[in-house]
Amino acid sequence: MGILKLEKKYSDCYPYIGHYFNGQKAVRYIFKLERLNKPIEASAYHQQVDGRTIKVAVEIFSMFSRPVGCKFCASGSLGKVQLLTVDEIVEQGKVIAKTVDRSIPIH
């Protein structure tokens, strides 16, 4: 049995007003956390200038659920907060790194 299983990957693009880029493509990765049999989400944000990706910011999670329990975030309703293991955290990064163009800086 693996640590994580990639269940779904989807993306959306939207304008973003910033100092260094004017668009962003968000790629979301939904993993099944085998140890808890629960979903977790990680993201890669492709920051763009006129449609061309200039860098990628990666968001990797270190816990299951959220301590705040925000109404807008589905993971806030998933129950008790549990920390992910080092292997579970690293595995998210490995999966995302395989899907990102390596010529673009990853932050």
Image (tube, helix red, strand yellow):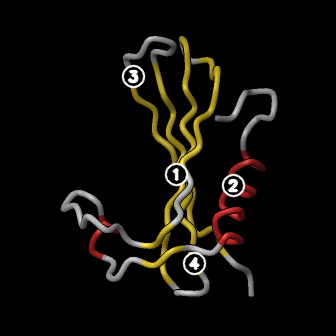
CA–CA distance between discs 4 and 3?
31 Å
**In the rendered image, which quarter is residue 73 located in?**
bottom left
Looking at the image, residue 64 lies above or below residue 48: below
Amino acid at the residue labelled 3: Tyr
Q: Quadrant of the C terminus?
A: top right
Amino acid at the residue labelled 1: Arg
Dot 1: what SS? strand
| Horizontal side, residue 83 vs residue 80: left or right | right
As drawn, the label of residue 28 is 1
Q: Quadrant of the N terminus?
A: bottom right
Q: Earlier in the sequence, mark 2 or mark 4?
A: 4
Point out residue 11 in the picture as x, y percentages from the top left corner: 51, 44
Dot 2: what SS? helix
**In the rendered image, which quarter is residue 19 located in?**
top left
As drawn, the label of residue 16 is 3
Q: Earlier in the sequence, mark 3 or mark 2?
A: 3
Dot 3: what SS? loop
Q: Residues within 10 Å of mark 4 (few under 14, many from 20)?
A: many
Q: Earlier in the sequence, mark 1 or mark 2?
A: 1
Point out residue 4 in the picture as x, y percentages from the top left corner: 66, 74
Amino acid at the residue labelled 2: Gly
Query: Residue extending furthest left?
Result: 71
Point out residue 53 in the picture as x, y percentages from the top left corner: 63, 23
Q: Residues within 10 Å of mark 3 (few under 14, many from 20)?
A: some
Q: Earlier in the sequence, mark 1 or mark 4?
A: 1
User: Which residue lies at the image location 57% right of the left edge and 68% below the top edge?
Assistant: 31
CA–CA distance between discs 3 and 2?
24 Å
CA–CA distance between discs 2 and 4?
14 Å
The residue to which callout 2 is attached is 93
